[in-house]
Each structure stands twice: as C-alpha cells, then as structure tokens.
Amino acid sequence: MTQQNQTAPARAIIQHPAVKWLLQALGAAAFILLVPLVFKMQWANFKPLFTATSLRFLSLGMLATIVVSIEAIILSLPLATLLALGRISPIKWISWPCIAFIEVLRSLPLLLLIFYINLRFPGLTIFADVSVGSKGSFIELLITSILSQGGMATMVALTFYTAAVNAELLRSGILSLERGQAEAARSLGLSYRQTMQHVILPQAYRRILAPLIAQFTILVKDTSLGAIIGFLELLKRGQILYQRDFNPMETLYVIALIYFVINYCLGLTQKLVARRQPTVPKTLTDNLADI
Amino acid sequence: MSERIPHTLGETIISMEHIVKKFGTFTALQDVSLSVRQGEVLMIIGPSGSGKSTLLRCINLLERPTSGTVIVDGMNLTDKSININKVREEVGMVFQRFELFPHLSVLENVMLAQRIVRKRDKAEAEQIARELLEKVGIPDKAASYPAQLSGGQQQRVAIARALAMQPKIMLFDEPTSALDPEMIKEVLDVMLDLAREGMTMVVVSHEMGFARNASNRVVFMDGGQIVETGDPDDVFTNPQHERTQLFLSKILH
C-alpha cells in the first residue's frame, strides 16, 4: 500500500498525455536512427531518393497504395456484413453459400487469389497497361496505375479476401452479444432486420473494432503483392528505383517508413472512432497493474 | 405495508390453452392452460426450473410452444400467418438483466422502438420518452448511458422503454432478481404505480409484498405444471398443495 503511494506521483507524470507523447516520439526517433546503423546503410545511398523525380515516382506509388487500400476497405465492409448475416441466417440456401465463400476464400493464399483474378478477368481495366516510362501528368499517372489491370485485380482480390476474413470477425462479434439484446429488441416489436440494423450490428462492430482495424493494416501491407502482377504501387516503384540506383537497403528502408506511417495513421482512426463511443466500463488493461 | 390495490377486470386478453414446450427431450411445460383478463395483475411463482419464465415467454412468442394455442388481444399467435411483430408492439417485456441497449443513451433507448416501429417523429418520441423517464423517476438521466446507471435505474429505464410503445400488456421476467436489496423498492414502486393505473401485468417474481399488494391472482408452478391458483392472501397463508407448502416454507422466513 505504502509502496503504491510512493510510486503514484511518478506514474502520474509518465501517464500525462504530453509526457507520454514525448516519450513515444523519442522512442520512435531512436528506432528510426538505430536501424540504418545496425544494417550499415550509407548516407550517400539515400541521396538519389531525395531527387524530385524519385520523390514524384515514389509518391505515385504511395498514393496508389493508399487509394487501392481505401477502395478495398470501403468495398469489403458491406460485403463482410452481408456474408456474416448470411452465415448466421437460419435459411440454409442463404447460409451455405456464405459459409462456402468464406471458408474457401480464407483458406487460399491471397497471392493465388490475385493471380487467379488477374488471369481469369483480364478486362478489369479501361486503360492500356501503364509502364514505367509512361508520360502524363501526376494525376493521370496515378489514375492509370490505380485503374490498371494489376491495380484492379489487386483491389478485387483484397476486397473479397478481407470481406471473408472480416465476415468471420463480425460473426464472432455478433455471437459475443447477450442473447437478451436481440430478445429485448424483438419484444419491442422490431423485426429481425431492424434488430440487426439498430441493435446487434452497431454493438458487434464496436466490439470488433480493434481486430477489424488490424485486418485493415494487413490489407494495406498486402497491396504490395500487387507488385508481382505489375501493379505500380509503393513497393514495386521502390524496386524499380533501387534497380536503377543500386541502393536496395536504403530504398526499402524509406518505403518501410512510409508503410509504417500509413498504418500508424490507420491505427489512429481506431482511437477516433473509439472516442465517439459512449462510456463503457473499464477494460481489463485499464487497471491490470493495480489488481 | 401499503394498501391492497383494487382491480377492475375486463375481457380476457391472454388465453393460453394446452401449452406444451419441449427443449429436446426435456419438457419445460406440460399441458398448461392459463387466461388473463384485462386489468389483472397475475403473479407466477415457483421453484427454479418450474417453467414459469418459459410460460411468460410464450405470451410474446420469445419461446414458440411445441403445441397448444396462445391468443393475445384476439390474435392467435400460433397461427403461422400472424405478424408476430404486430403482437409484440402491444406486449411490453421487462427482463431480469434489463437488456438496455448499451450503445444508446437512456433517451435513445426509450425512443428507438417508438421511432422505428411506431414511426413517431423525433420530437414526439422524445417528448413521450421524457415523460416516461419522469414517471419512473429518473428524468435527469436522459443523456446518460446504461453503463453509468445503477441496476435499479437501469431497470426503471427498461420499464420506460417498454411503456413507450403504449402496450396493452406488460410482462415482467424476474424484474428484481438481479438487483441489490436497496434498489428493489424503487423498481417495485414503479410497478405498483402501473398496477394502480390498471395495466394488465404478468409478473414472474418472488416478491411476496408486491404480490399481496398489487396482484389479484397468484399461480404456483412446479415441474412444468400449474399446481395451484388463487388469491395471493389465500395462497400464501393457506396453501392447499403440499408442493406449494414446501416451496413457501423455503422462501417465507
């Protein structure tokens, strides 16, 4: 008891938001500087990356990655919801196809899915394939790489795959709710659909928010698989650059930082969404050390 | 002890005939028949597993009877063509564990079904919700979320939520069993007010004080059957059946 009182002020200082933020920033900075040292990167090798053409070239890739990720995230959400609801449907001819779709897609390697969609649906793009030497304005090049065959196939594969994974996630969220919630809603006269829409799904989505965002960060990282079928996203463009400048370590390091920043921002959205939630009882980790 | 509430009884509003409910091989209800008249406050008591909650849940078809007929407000619920949602609009239910919607504020909890089912506009629904929160004694908690309320307050919100649909019948499934002792009275007071207003109520509970003051009839169930029915004073002071005597000797001390 006395020991706890002594450490209380120290803990209060560490837990102050500003101090917490500063410590995190220092830690991140140290890590960012440490990695190049450990891997013996050379400053000279970073220089070709910071030319106007290289930066423009990489920015195109970064934006292509971000846009395709956002497309897949937005499209996968309603699909995942329908698949989850379909799977728990008491009507067999609705639930069985949903189960089959979910189980098959979840068990396949994403890369196989990307290959398959790319080969089976060669007409996904309205543009001729973009290649490295294409001329055009920044926006034109961005749109053509996003809507290229590679970009579209990657987006479609990621959408279906993520929808299948998140459908299971959402189903677990639905099943974790008290049975009484549905009974209370139904006893008020709400229909099955209204109960799902207004009572069950909002709660289920709140419960699975953290793993849902985690799945979306996986999605962002997996856009890099598109590089294999010629989607000019961030990693592919990085590869092209280091094959010209012979600086793979340094280029990949910069690309890694960009992926980190994208996914860190995605993680922040979780906090934003969570802040809009009504007050809920403390979670286990809030006072785990005090128990 | 407060005075016993007089009851004005009307037409039969709930009529259950030969209800059998089986869960797999277990028979929860064995040929139970029961009818409730308008304005009645019927208490169902009995030991755990006696089928009293199951019987209550058959009234709004949260449990579908294996056989038998349930007629509520002139509608035969066991008829497949009946729209069960229409019946449930007229039958409010209060649960042992409140089952408020935790993602909605107290006010939104009371407004939700009014807006969706009764199609009331926002202003009207909010006005009704605020009046009901006033009635159950917690108008100041409208903006709070269920997790911020005590058990007794949550249960009173749950009653307000059910009343917002202006039901003809209210079902209570052990409404005070999950409450701390000092909160039981505040919930029972709200229920007493309802009884005084002439609401038709079916209550599964062991609150003997409430039974004596508010109810006009007590049903004792055991083993999925109705063992004894009668005036609360008669049943409690002079039970006819051995099983009723045994049960009452355990809970009255």
Image (spheres, coloured by chain):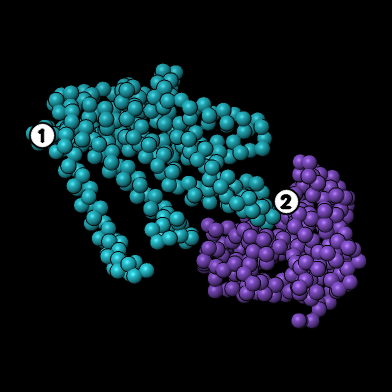
- Vertical position of residue A23 compared to residue A38: above or below: below
Which quadrant of the figure contains the N terminus of chain B?
bottom right
Q: Who is closer to the viewer here, A247 or B163?
A: A247
Q: Which mark is residue A42?
A: 1
Which quadrant of the figure contains the C terminus of chain B?
bottom right
Mark 2: secondary structure: loop
User: Where is residue B111 drawn, in percent x and y?
Assistant: 60, 62
- In the image, what residue occupies the spot 23% across and 57% down? A22
Q: Chain of mark 2?
A: B
- Horizontal arrangement in the rendering, residue A218 relative to residue B149 (left or right): left
Q: Which chain is purple?
A: B
- Horizontal arrangement in the rendering, residue A250 relative to residue B20 (left or right): left
Q: Which chain is cyan?
A: A
- What amino acid does circle 2 point to? Leu
- In the image, what residue occupies the spot 32% across and 23% down? A228
Q: Who is closer to the viewer here, B167 or A56?
A: B167
Gap in angstroms between the C-alphas marked 1 and 2:
71 Å
Q: Which mark is residue B195?
A: none
Q: Which mark is residue B62?
A: 2
Q: Quadrant of residue B188?
A: bottom right
Q: Quadrant of residue B172?
A: bottom right
User: Where is residue A107 drawn, in percent x and y?
Assistant: 48, 27
